[in-house]
Amino acid sequence: RLLDAIKTISNAVGSLGIVGGQTMDIKMKGEKPDPKTLRYIHSRKTACFISASCEIGGILAGTSKKKREALRKGGLYLGMAFQIIDDLLDVIGDEKKVGKRLRKDKDKVTYPALYGIDGSRFRAKAYTELAIRNFQKLGNASDKLIEISKYLEQRMF
């Protein structure tokens, strides 16, 4: 189990994960965003890390491959929603409430830059619903993950 967990986190942070996503994010700074590139960047940064974290929980708990897949997918969707909401908060958030300096992503490829505020909210909600649907496959063990997903969605409003 431990080796599977190490392999999962190693893949998540490597060139096909966070390193690759961050490299593309830097490369695209100041460029016109397109949907495919935006999904690539987001799925390999925060979403990849959250997905791996959820999957590792399943690995270490000894769950079935089917449940680990639900954790991995749910984590990926949750991470996508998180990043979209983070992008939204950078544009419309209150620094005191958010707890960090905002308006720093104006030259980056973001969901609000590509889809606007309403389009980004719609996509964040859709990803949150996909995350919850996957977490529900875990039965009662999913309560906290579903609670976190619902909180995240409310965070944007």
Image: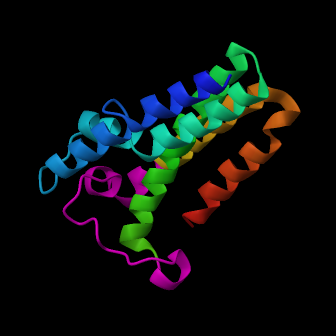
Residue 38 seen anywhere in this rendered image of the structure: yes
- Residue 81 picture location, percent across and down: 51, 47
Residue 44 seen anywhere in this rendered image of the structure: no
* Colour setting: rainbow
**52, above or below 144, in the image:** above
- In this picture, residue 110 sits left or right of residue 143: left
Residue occupying the point 23% across, 66% down? 106
- Residue 17 picture location, percent across and down: 38, 34
Task: State yes or no: residue 52 in magenta.
Answer: no
Task: State yes or no: residue 98 in magenta.
Answer: yes
- In this picture, residue 18 sits left or right of residue 106: right
Residue occupying the point 55% across, 36% down? 51
In the displayed orientation, state which residue is furthest to the front.
3
In the displayed orientation, state which residue is furthest to the left.
31
- Quarter-wise, where is residue 100 in the image? bottom left
Residue occupying the point 21% across, 40% down? 34
- Residue 146 picture location, percent across and down: 73, 44
In the displayed orientation, state which residue is furthest to the top.
65
- Residue 15 picture location, percent across and down: 30, 33
Looking at the rendered image, the quarter that the N terminus falls into is top right
Q: Which residues are magenta?
A: 94-122
- In this picture, residue 36 sits left or right of residue 131: left
